[in-house]
Amino acid sequence: MATFPRDLKAEINRAIELCQQRLQYCEDQTTKPSPALDHLIKETFAYPWEDAHKEGKVSYYATPRMLTGNVEGPALNSLEILAEKQVKFDVIFIDADKTGYFQYYKVCLQVYHPP
């Protein structure tokens, strides 16, 4: 059995822990989909994407990994927490409620750190 340096193993364990925390955070912040959205999600997953791609009906083959469902929740609150923690990002994509864009933009300026 191969042995790994302790610091490498610690870094890998930390990465796993961060992934688990992110998953739990998303679960905690996600609202249940409305009946209409739930229907859309089920129909999207059931659609024969590979066949549609082969038949030229769509220009790409959407894999299940690309169809992540929905993550909804208090985006502004999450951004404000990131800003308070002085977390920095080099790319920010806002896909949220349109009426809150100005507030999102203001907070994003605090967390944006160009490369």
Image: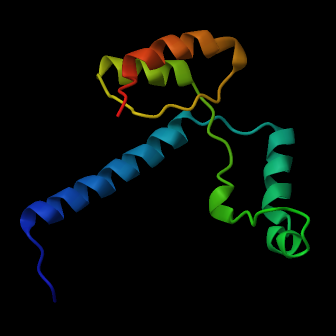
Place residue 31 in its image quadrant. top right
Name the residue rendered at 49%, 11% in the picture.
106
Task: Say whether residue 103 is left or right of residue 99.
Answer: left
Figure check: 9 above or below 115: below
Where is residue 17 shown, x and y percent of the image?
A: 30, 52
Where is residue 80 shown, x and y percent of the image?
A: 42, 17
Name the residue rendered at 63%, 33% in the picture.
72
Task: Say whether residue 12 is left or right of residue 5.
Answer: right
Task: Say whether residue 55 is left or right of residue 110.
Answer: right
Figure check: 35 above or below 55: above
Figure check: 5 above or below 84: below
Colouring scheme applied when the structure was drawn: rainbow
Name the residue rendered at 55%, 16% in the picture.
104
Viewer-side residue, 56 vs 45: 56
Where is residue 57 shown, x and y percent of the image?
A: 91, 64
Name the residue rendered at 74%, 39% in the picture.
33
